[in-house]
Image: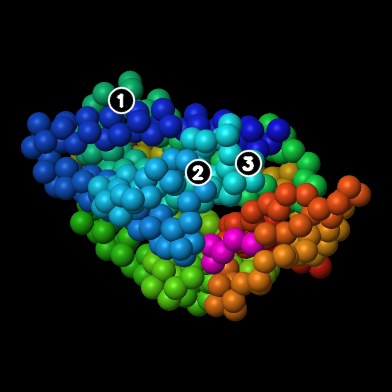
Amino acid sequence: MTFRVDCLLTTAGLPLFLVDIVLDVLAAVEFYKEGSYLCLGVLLVLLIGSSVLVQLYSWLWYSYDQFEMRTRVEESAKPGLGVLHWVQLGIYSCCSDCDSQEEDTAAFLNQDLSMLRIIETFSESAPQIVLMLTVLLQDGLRGVQHTPLCTIGSLSAVAYCVTTYHRCLRSFLPEKEEQSILSSLVFFTWNLLLLAARIVALALFASVFPCFIFTHFVCSWLLFCYFAWWADTHFMDTVGGEWLYRATVGLIWYFDWFNVVDGKTRTWAILYHCWILLDVSVLCGLWFWKMSWDPPDFELSRRQAAVVWGAVVAGYALGLVLRIVYYTCFHPKLNKDELRGGSAKMLADEVDSPPDDDDDGGRVMFRSVLRTSTGPSRPPLCNKRMKKLAENFYSSSADGAEV
């Protein structure tokens, strides 16, 4: 049942994807008509750069699998797969054959698609929201009657993507209880609060210091890339692919926490959120200082600016409180042995040759025979790369610390 719900959520995302494309085109046309060529250039860089990044990951994963196709859609596209990636149409067609494909194959591809969506969200959607809010703030919030609803909708879409990714990782939990609606709602809410506070703080700063926002991003991204390298991640199968992944992690960390470390990460998460909370406070503080001595053309009192500053910081703090509530009451905690199936009723034995050492953590598939009272059943597929991320995300250490 959980898989069918996740597959339905994935399929429901297609209309949203098409709507997003239409809105992107309309935004580009609007910038062009207004003569905002700098904003138009930034928007095009975000759109094209994000698409190229996603296609690059898709191509690398296909190459790691030696271009083995699992669905009819992939088989039909195989002769022109390279061309499709060049024209930015080569990502996995995951749920197109959900009814005719075996459930584990669809789940396998759905896990890849959820990762691609995360990459696209934080390389395109989140920066684009910052750009749009910045333009609105610089224009004096013209059309403010529509701005709050559109902004909340865009932020909700980003939080929704993070939530569906979280649900996808749950598929690796052996004998898991189905995730309740309340659990997903709490997860969605605290992510929405954290993302909203971070993105609004960046937009406020960019509206008064548009040149320095690029410096802030580059310096923060380089710092996060360094920590991703220091964490010694093992996600891709090649050295170049792993460096691409670490650069992508640095980009995601600029907006939101993303667990990539094997082992206890409570300290990592605390340090990250303390740093982002400090950064949000400083960004809003600089915006308040600029508004105090050089106010814009539109009316905004010193008290109103102070309220905005406090609301953004308080929103991030409230998100952290809800995050603690989630991990205390709703987050499943398993040790590594349980997560890998040590306590599951079904015993898994590998029947194919084991993966090489340099494939550890990559997108290598392995088959296992599930021993039951009636004999061996059909061998399922397992996405080892995403399984490793799930182990990092869900397992707990002996002392109960989140990892």
Which amino acid lies under the numbered mark 3 shown in the image of this protein?
Answer: Glu
Q: Is residue 183 magenta?
A: no
CA distance for labels 2 and 1 = 47 Å
The mark found on residue 144 in the picture is: 1
Quarter holding residue 34? top left
CA distance for labels 1 and 3 = 49 Å
Q: Is residue 213 left or right of residue 101?
A: left
Q: Is residue 24 visible?
A: yes
The residue positioned 18% from the left and 44% from the top of the image is 39
The mark found on residue 292 in the picture is: none
Task: Establish if 343 lies above or below 307.
Answer: below
Main secondary structure type of the part rendered in magenta: loop
Which amino acid lies under the numbered mark 2 shown in the image of this protein?
Answer: Thr
User: Helix, strand or loop at disc 2?
Assistant: loop
Task: Establish if 36 lies above or below 399.
Answer: above
Quarter holding residue 251? bottom left
The residue positioned 32% from the left and 60% from the top of the image is 217
The residue positioned 38% from the left and 50% from the top of the image is 78
Residue in the foreground of this view, choosing between 302 and 316: 316
Q: Give the residues in magenta.
A: 362-366
Q: Which residue is mark 2?
A: 71
Can you give x and y, in whole percent of width and height, for residue 236 in the image?
48, 67
Quadrant of image for the N terminus: top right
Residue in the foreground of this view, choosing between 237 and 150: 237
The mark found on residue 102 in the picture is: 3
Sequence order check, earlier mark of 1 and 3: 3
Coloured how? rainbow
Quadrant of image for the C terminus: bottom right
